[in-house]
Image (cartoon, rainbow, N blue to C red):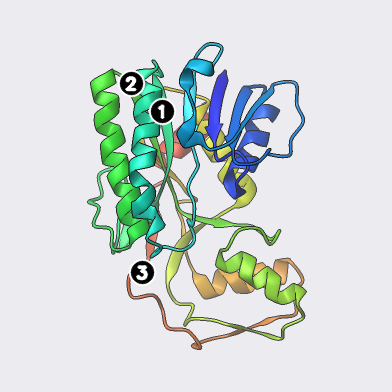
Amino acid sequence: MKIMVTGADGYIGSGVVRQLLNEGHHVIAMGLAPCGITDANLTEYVGDIFDFDFAKLDGLPDALLHLAWRNGFSHNDISHLEDLPKHYLFIKAALAAGMKRVAVMGTMHEVGYHEGAVDEFTPCHPTTPYGVAKNALRELTEELCRQHGAVIQWLRGFYLVSNDGRGNSIFSKLVAAEREGKKKFPFTTGKTKYDFLPYEAFCRQVAAVVSQDAVTGIINICSGTPVALGMYIEQFIKDNGFAIKLAYGEYPDRPYDSPAIWGDNTKIQAILASE
C-alpha cells in the first residue's frame, strides 16, 4: 500500500514509519524535519503540513495516517485548541482531493473521567484542552468522511511506554532522572490503574490498523489490561536495571484521572489476528 504519514519525524511517527516500511508499504512521510530513515520505499515532504498542497502528489495514497500534533504531553496547553482548526482544514483538504480513507491518532483523554473499560460506544466528556481538541477533531472528521463517502479509522491511544528517554512522558522523565544519577523520583500514590503498551507494540498496532480497511471506526491502541501505575513503574525500573527509587506521595494524583481506566482491545486483537 501507499500510506501518507504526518508527524513522521515525531516520537510515534518515526516508529510507525519504520514499521510500515518493514512491512513492505510505500510511505509518504511528512514532518517539520526528516524522519531519519533511508529506504527505497520512502518519500519525504519536509515542511509545515498545514501549507501542503495535495495537488503535488503523484497519485493519491491509499490512506492518510494523521499523527501530527504538538504538545501532546501537556494536556492543559492552549495550543491544542489553537491548532484544532488547522487539523480540521488539513483533513478537509485531503478528503476534497479525493482521499478515501483517513486514520487519525486520538487519545483516551477524549473520554474524560471514566471508570472501567473504554470501547467505541463509551460517552466522551473530556476535561482538558488536549482531550477537548482531540474529541472535537474526531467528531468533525467523522462528519467530513460522511460527506465525502470516505472511511474513518480513529486510533484511540492509551499509555505509551518507552525506555529510550524520548518524549515527555513519566517514563522519559524517569529515564532522564536515572541518567542524571538521581536517587529518588517524586511520584504520586501510584494506585491509579492505566492501560500500558510498550513502544514497539504501540507502533505495530498503529501500522496494523492503517494497513487494512476491514475494521474501521474507533479502534483502541491498547493492551486491554489495567495495571496500577506504581506496580508498572516498579517493574519498569527493575527490567531496565535502574537504581532510582520512587518517592511515593510527593505529587498528588491528577484530579481528572479516574481510579482505573483501560481500553477494550476486541477490535485491535481482531486486526492483529487477521495479519
The amino acid on which the numbered mark 3 sits, given as a three-letter code, is Asp
**Contact (CB < 8 A) between labels 1 and 2?**
yes
Q: Residue at x 75, y 77 (%)?
A: 180
Residue 146, can we see it? yes
Which residue is tagged 3? 257
Closer to viewer: mark 3 or mark 1:
1
Q: Position of residue 105 (x, y in %)?
A: 44, 42
Tell me the distance, in whole angstroms, between the alpha carbons under discs 1 and 2.
Answer: 7 Å
97 and 171: which is toward the camera: 97
Amino acid type of the residue that numbered disc 1 sits on in the rendered structure: Val
- The residue at 57%/19% (across/down) is 2
Q: Earlier in the sequence, mark 3 or mark 2?
A: 2
Q: Secondary structure at mark 1?
A: strand
Q: Is residue 200 above or below residue 43?
A: below
Residue 187 lies, in percent from the top left, at 54, 81
- Left or right: residue 139 compared with residue 44: left
Could you tell which of marks 3 and 1 lies nearer the N-terminus?
1
Q: In the rendered structure, which disc, 1 or 2, sits on the residue that comes first in sequence?
A: 1
Q: Which residue is under mark 1?
A: 102
Q: How many angstroms separate mark 3 from mark 2 (CA)?
A: 34 Å
- Residue 61 visible in the displayed image: no
**Residue behind mark 2:** 150
**Quadrant position of the N terminus in the picture:** top right
| Dots 3, 1 in contact, CB < 8 A | no
Q: Residue at x 42, y 37 (%)?
A: 104
Judge whether 13 appears above or below 212 on screen: below
